[in-house]
Amino acid sequence: TSTATLRNVEASRELSRIVSTSLGPNGMNKLVVNHLQKIIVTSDCAAIVRELEIEHPAAKMLAMASDAQDKECGDGTNLTVSFAGELLGQTEDLLRMGLHPSEIVAGYKNAGERLLSLLPELAVDAVQDCTDRQSLIAKVVKPVLSAKQYGSEDDLAPLVVDACLATMGSPSSNSNNSKPTVNPDSVRVTKILGSNVTQSTVIRGFVALRGSDTTVTSATNAKITVFGCAIEASGTEAKGTVLMKTADDLMGYNKSEEKKMEEIIKSIADTGCTVVVSGGTVSEMALHFIERYGLLCLRCPSKFDLRRLCTATGSTALVRLGPATPDEMGYCDSVTVREVGGRKITVFASQDDDTASSSGGASGRGGGRLSTIVLRASTTSTLADLERAIDDGVHSVKMACRDGRLVPGAGATEMDLSVRIKNYADTCPGLDQYAVRAFAKALEVVPRTLAENAGLDGASVLAALGAAHANGNAMAGIDIEAAGTGRTGVDESTDVRDLLNVKVNAFRLAIDAALTVLRVDQIIMSKPAGGGMKDARMGQS
């Protein structure tokens, strides 16, 4: 057997071992210090793998699979890495038995196809209506959030669902698809340090983490002009010399600049605009005239935030100073400056699109679908971890809108698949059956890890769970709260649900990554750059 194959397997198992202890609600956090000395405390597999500096090419394959799963589904990244690592771990024994890697690959491929055909049969429930709030909270979002932030899911799940429902396209607006859809980019998270998770809220619209630059702090039915440039007197591109002969010339020069700025601000105010947003600086003189005409002025130095504000209000960022046309102007029901946790924020809030358009309100003329979750927590690392959990929750709603079918969670699906594929292995002729049986054993990694992370005896719980599934109880899962209670650790009818298409995607990526690693028998590394110069210097000396 090629030593390169065994080394690849070992590297992949090591990565899998790192993240598997973070699987499930009782998963442990990892404290990662990245190359910038930034500290990340999280149990989210995608974040851990992203921040680790993985050098080994085979382990990088698993990292790429995790990244692909995170981008596509948001959830199920730990399942991808853990299962791929366990699959490769099982190959070690098969290789020592004398099986050739190509025979193992054929067996795994066969078992993988069988698994993907069996999975839809295990669906026990479905989200029929993607706009049903209670159904989304209980069946889709809570299981995802409890795996990341166990104990906070009751507070976070309603926030995620309300934010998603506020941004959902209505069925009538989707010409090709009758189902509503969710764009994860339309749900933003604003983090404010202090207080606790229960104080978090959802705002339909955009939240800027700064206050107004003028004394005006609120506007209703606001017309908004957004400038992508600074609001100040523009300097000439070419150098010029102004010759002044008398004091009157100097006074007149200053006055002409003031007069020009006043004309610009007056023309903006005359359009009916009540809020001015600048992507750059605002000069003292411009601020003086903005104040005089009673406008609310906000500086937004982040180009990303400026783009989101334009999306939320339906405005166009202008690159010239001057009044906006009605098409370029944004609309919002209310703009208010609030104080949250000792920090001033500006809230651009919109009412519901349907009521706005029927009442002829300002937002009915072009406000975009955007909602913001204002997150509160006591530390920056907790805030960052909560944001990652919310992102996963939003992605799960997006996936539920595509396909609402649900399978049993808590390791029940994996255990049932394991039993079925073991039975299938008995019908397979030839050496493939060993690889198929190893594949079935690898599926046990999920219930075993869930049990071990919950403080239960993995072997005894796995035996009891296997017996329950062998007797035909497909709903039996791990009871993570059984530690210290005297219960067996097996929940005969688990109420945890996982999305079918998230599982399908995770298994497909894990199998592909494992097979790619197994097909490698040699790693050829190019020589690091700069070697030639070093040799040349040594030759000169």
Image (cartoon, grey):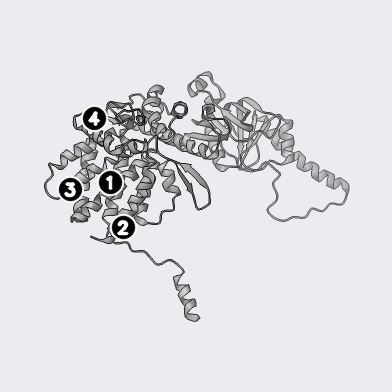
The Cα–Cα distance between marks 2 and 4, rounded to whole angstroms, is 37 Å
Please state, as top left, top right, bottom left or bottom right, where the N terminus lies in the image: bottom left
For marks 1 and 4, give the CA distance: 23 Å
Residue mark closest to the camera, 1 vs 4: 4
N-term-proximal mark, 2 vs 3:
2
Q: Which residue is mark 2?
A: 7
**C-alpha separation, residue under disc 1 versus residue under disc 3:** 17 Å
Label pair 1/4, CB-CB below 8 angstroms: no
Q: Which residue type does callout 2 highlight?
A: Arg
- Residue that carries the numbered disc 3 in the rendered image: 434
- Which residue appears at 48% of the width and 78% of the height? 538
Residue for badge 1: 511
Amino acid type, residue under disc 1 in the picture? Ile
Q: Amino acid at mark 3?
A: Tyr
| Residue designated by label 4 | 474
Q: Give the residue at the far top of this rendering.
A: 359
Residue 95: x %, y % from top left: 22, 55
Q: Residues within 10 Å of mark 3 (few under 14, many from 20)?
A: many
Along the line of sight, the residue nearer the viewer: 46 or 243: 46
Percent across and percent down for residue 522 are 29, 62
Which of the two labelled residues, at mark 4 and mark 3, occupies the earlier sequence position? 3
Q: Locate residue 374, reporting x and y percent.
A: 54, 31
Earlier in the chain: of badge 1 and badge 4, it is 4
At label 4, the amino acid type is: Ala
Q: Earlier in the sequence, mark 2 or mark 4?
A: 2
